[in-house]
């Protein structure tokens, strides 16, 4: 039996991600550039600590990280 790592952004973190991604995409489109996408960094901590999420070097919230049997 294998394992799968499941990373879930909470509602606030998801909202913050979309705000930053929309702003970046709009700026690129206004400059007539093809949108480049976004980079998410997730600092995974031991299970009893929060795992923090950054988007384009801006901390945007927390994520839950679970190891699931598949």
Image (spheres, rainbow, N blue to C red):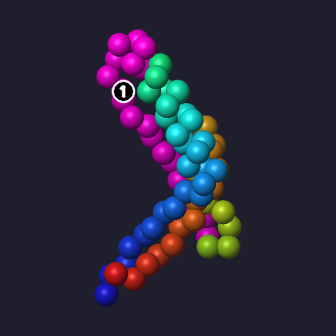
Instruction: Note whether 66 is above or below 17 in the view shown.
Output: below
Q: Nearer the viewer, residue 19 or 56?
A: 19
Q: Nearer the viewer, residue 65 or 16?
A: 16
Task: Give the extent of the magenta segment.
Answer: 28-46
Work out which residue is located at the far top of the displayed protein and give it: 31
Q: Nearer the viewer, residue 15 or 48?
A: 15
> As drawn, is 42 to the left or to the right of 25?
right
Classed neighbour count for the residue bearing mark 1: other residues with Cα under 10 Å, few (<14), some (14–19), many (≥20)? some
Q: Is residue 56 in view?
A: no
Instruction: Note whether 4 is above or below 29 in the view shown.
Output: below
Residue linked to disc 1: 35
The residue under the point 46% across, 22% down is: 26
The residue under the point 45% across, 40% down is: 39
* Residue 22 x/y as whole percent: 49, 31
Q: Secondary structure at mark 1?
A: loop
Instruction: Note whether 57 is above or below 69 in the view shown.
Output: above
Report if residue 48 lies within the magenta region: no
The residue under the point 49% across, 27% down is: 24
* Residue 16 x/y as whole percent: 60, 42
* Residue 51 x/y as whole percent: 61, 60
Quadrant of the image for the N terminus? bottom left
Report if residue 33 lies within the magenta region: yes
Which SS type dominates the magenta stretch? loop
* Residue 27 x/y as whole percent: 47, 19
> As drawn, is 1 to the left or to the right of 38?
left
């Amino acid at each position: 039996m294998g394992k799968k790592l499941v990373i879930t952004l909470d509602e606030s973190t998801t909202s913050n991600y979309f705000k930053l991604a929309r702003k970046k995409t709009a700026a690129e489109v206004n400059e007539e550039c093809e949108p480049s996408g976004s980079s998410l960094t997730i600092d995974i901590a031991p299970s009893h600590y929060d795992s923090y999420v950054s988007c384009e070097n801006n901390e945007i919230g927390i994520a839950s990280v679970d190891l699931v049997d598949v």
